[in-house]
Image: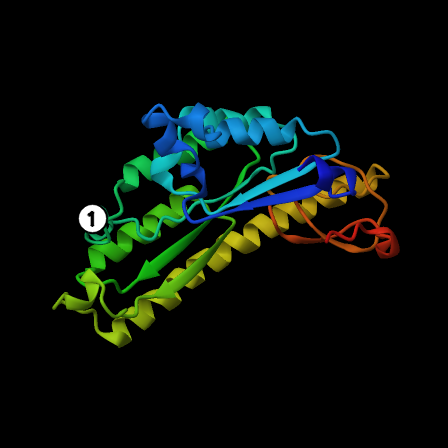
Amino acid sequence: MRELAAAGVREITLLGQTVNAYGRHDLRRGKAAAVGTESFAALLRRLAGEPGIERIRYTSPHPSFFDDDLVRAHGQLAPLCPHVHLPAQSGSDAVLERMRRPYTAAHYRALCDRLRAARPDVALTTDLIVGFPGETDADFRATLALVRDVAFVDAYTFKYSPRPNTTAEAFADAVDPAVAQARLEELQDVQRSLTLAAHRAARRQRDRGARRGREPVRGPGVGPRSVPPRGKSRSQSGKPVTSCAFDWSRRPRIR
């Protein structure tokens, strides 16, 4: 990381399935020091302390592995982008149990509340599946309620499709494809309205900054940094934005 920072890298993204489980098993077994690992929050704190690193992102975490220290890190580490992509999959406890997701909708809502308490401008995005075997209309309505309650900035939404050699493939209570499609479209309509509302709020915020003679890279979950206009970048919440005119001829070349 020090070599990357010295070469001019200013933003890093940590990738992994259940990335926030990093170090968890070694810590629980008392082997972290021996194998050179640490908690995910501790790793973020160490990276945030590296000179030159201005922005840190990570994806995708699992709701079950969000501990208090990781939540606090979002309110304490300036380089940590205020965006969490937090896959929910469903807002129905019955469906979550069938999916073998070891949390409830209430746990998920509480986690979102804790993140927003630690970092009020955090942008929350998610993954959602409709039409999972056995999903009733009440289950689907519970998912819509979760989406509205959390007010996600964006979501990846999918219609369930069977996968070979999975437990769900053997479930006999498949949802009718036409019903699943209708649910997907209704879910996307709800999310689209929330996404547009978030974009309009971000634009109003940006326009207020422009009237003050500044052009902040701003959006849901973005700090008030002023930059020259023009050029394409991403906000701290991961959305495309117009920002400074980068001199690409000077970008670092990492081999």
> How far across and down, in percent of the image, does residue 233 sit?
73, 52
Is 22 on the left or on the right of 227, as rendered?
left
Residue 6: quadrant of the picture? top right
From where the camera sits, is residue 235 visible? yes
Seen in the picture, residue 43 relative to 154 is either above or below; the reply is above
In the structure shown, which secondary structural element does the residue marked by tag 1 occupy?
A: helix
Is 243 on the left or on the right of 155, as rendered?
right
> How far across and down, in percent of the image, does residue 10 sit?
73, 41
Residue 159: quadrant of the picture? bottom left
Seen in the picture, residue 27 relative to 198 is either above or below; the reply is above
Question: Closer to the camera, 52 or 187?
Answer: 52
Q: Residue at x 18, y 49 (%)?
A: 94
Is 230 on the left or on the right of 75, as rendered?
right
Q: Residue at x 65, y 33 (%)?
A: 79
> How far across and down, in percent of the image, does residue 105 sit?
29, 42
Look at the image and tell me in which quarter the N terminus lies.
top right
From where the camera sits, is residue 117 visible? no
Identified by mark 1, the residue type is Glu
Q: Residue at x 38, y 26 (%)?
A: 31
Look at the image and tell me in which quarter the C terminus lies.
bottom right
Q: Residues within 10 Å of mark 1 (few under 14, many from 20)?
A: few
- Which residue position holds label 1? 97
Question: Closer to the camera, 61 or 190?
Answer: 61
